[in-house]
Image (cartoon, rainbow, N blue to C red):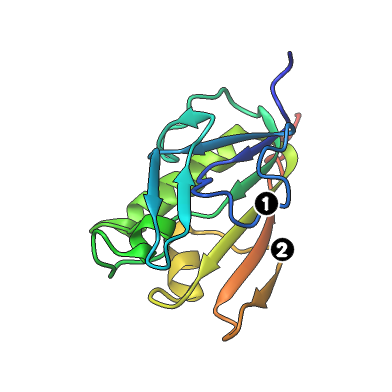
Amino acid sequence: MERPPILDACCGGRMFWFDKQNPLAVFVDNRESSDKLCDGRAFEVKPDTLADFTNLPFGDRKFKLVVFDPPHLVNAGETSWLAKKYGVLEDGWEQMMKDGFDECMRVLDDYGVLIFKWNETQISVGRILTAIGRQPLFGHKSGRTNKTHWMCFMKVPERTCDT
């Protein structure tokens, strides 16, 4: 079977997917776990492929759509429900986010679309855009306090001049 056309590079619990088993997607995360949240609900991280988003095990230009919803917290207790659901960034997060974004763009096909989700509760959108060194085509704020941002990027190949 041919590789699915969608990559979710940090799937976590697949929380925003309507179909959490969508056959069009490859779900990747660097962790696998099954926990109970503070309210007793089960929470599972079960990627198809166990890998770090800064070093994806796929060739160049393999996906038409990449979803990138990386951890966005720098302060959360190691065993807190926030850390379990969303993960936590470590020191040097700016370089890690740049490397991860570049890696997502590497596996994205020419004229493919990358959807980037970021919550600016602890790190502003301006800081994350500076870290990754790119500007989105467009985006949308959502959530109760408008701190979650959905941004759209497109991989446009660099033009070469034939002389």
Q: Out of 103 and 158, give the one closest to the viewer.
A: 103
Q: Is residue 62 above or below residue 66?
A: above
Please state which amino acid type lies under the numbered disc 2: Leu
Give whichever of 1, 22 is nearer the camera: 22
The residue sitting at 58% across, 49% down in the picture is 14
Q: Secondary structure at mark 1?
A: loop
- State the separation of the CA atoms marked 2 and 1: 22 Å
Question: Do callouts 2 and 1 mark residues in contact (Cβ within 8 Å)?
Answer: no
Amino acid at circle 1: Trp
Q: Position of residue 77 (x, y in %)?
A: 24, 66
Mark 1 neighbour density, 10 Å: few (under 14) some (14–19) many (20 or more): few
Q: Nearer the viewer, mark 2 or mark 1?
A: 1
Which residue is pictured at 30% across the width and 67% down the height?
Answer: 74
Q: Is residue 156 above or below residue 78?
A: above
Q: Nearer the viewer, residue 94 or 53?
A: 53
- Label ID, residue 17: 1
Residue 139 appears left or right of 134: right
Q: In the displayed structure, does residue 87 sit left or right of residue 103?
A: left
The percent position of residue 85, horizontal first and vertical second, equals 43, 58
Please give the residue where the numbered disc 2 appears in the rendered image. Answer: 137
